Image (spheres, rainbow, N blue to C red):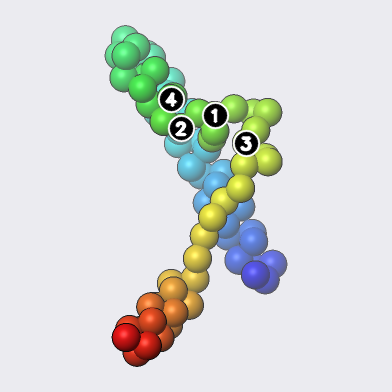
Amino acid sequence: MNNVDALRISGQRDDICEWVVTRFRELMEEDRIDDAICFADEWFEWMDPNNYESEETMFYDEQDLLTHYMSMEEDD
């Protein structure tokens, strides 16, 4: 992975984290407490400031994945 990809992925993580916190707050403001709790349960790792930075992000290069898939089909 090059620096450009690392910066892009970091930016995407930041965007997701901001969206999660914003959405949770919206649900709370709408008095949709049960929905907010379920939402927070699903996205807990992204909301927890103690774990957010150490949480691993799994990603793939679409072209690499397609090439791998096609090579597996050829082996069959």
Proximity of marks 4 and 2: CB atoms separated by less than 8 Å:
yes
Residue visible at 67% across and 40% down in the picture = 53
Disc 3 residue crowd, few under 14, some 14–19, many 20+, Cα 10 Å: some
Label 2 to label 3: alpha-carbon separation: 11 Å
Which numbered marker is on residue 52? 3
- Which amino acid lies under the numbered mark 1 shown in the image of this protein? Met
Image location of residue 67, percent across then percent down? 42, 82
| Element type where label 4 sits in the image | helix
The picture places residue 62, in percent across and down from the top left corner, at: 43, 72
The one nearer the camera, 8 or 59, is: 59
Mark number displayed over residue 7: none
Answer yes or no: do the residues labelled 2 and 1 have beta carbons within 8 Å? yes
Q: Secondary structure at mark 1?
A: helix
**CB of mark 2 within 8 Å of CB of mark 3?**
no
At a point 44% along the width and 24% down the height, the residue shown is 40
Q: Mark 4 belongs to which amino acid? A: Asp
Q: Report the residue at 65% width, 70% height from top.
A: 1
> Which label's residue is closer to the chain start, 2 or 3?
2
Say which of 34 and 4 sits in front.
34
Residue marked by disc 1:
47
Q: Secondary structure at mark 2?
A: loop
Mark 3 vs mark 1, CA separation in Å: 7 Å
Q: Which residue is mark 4?
A: 41
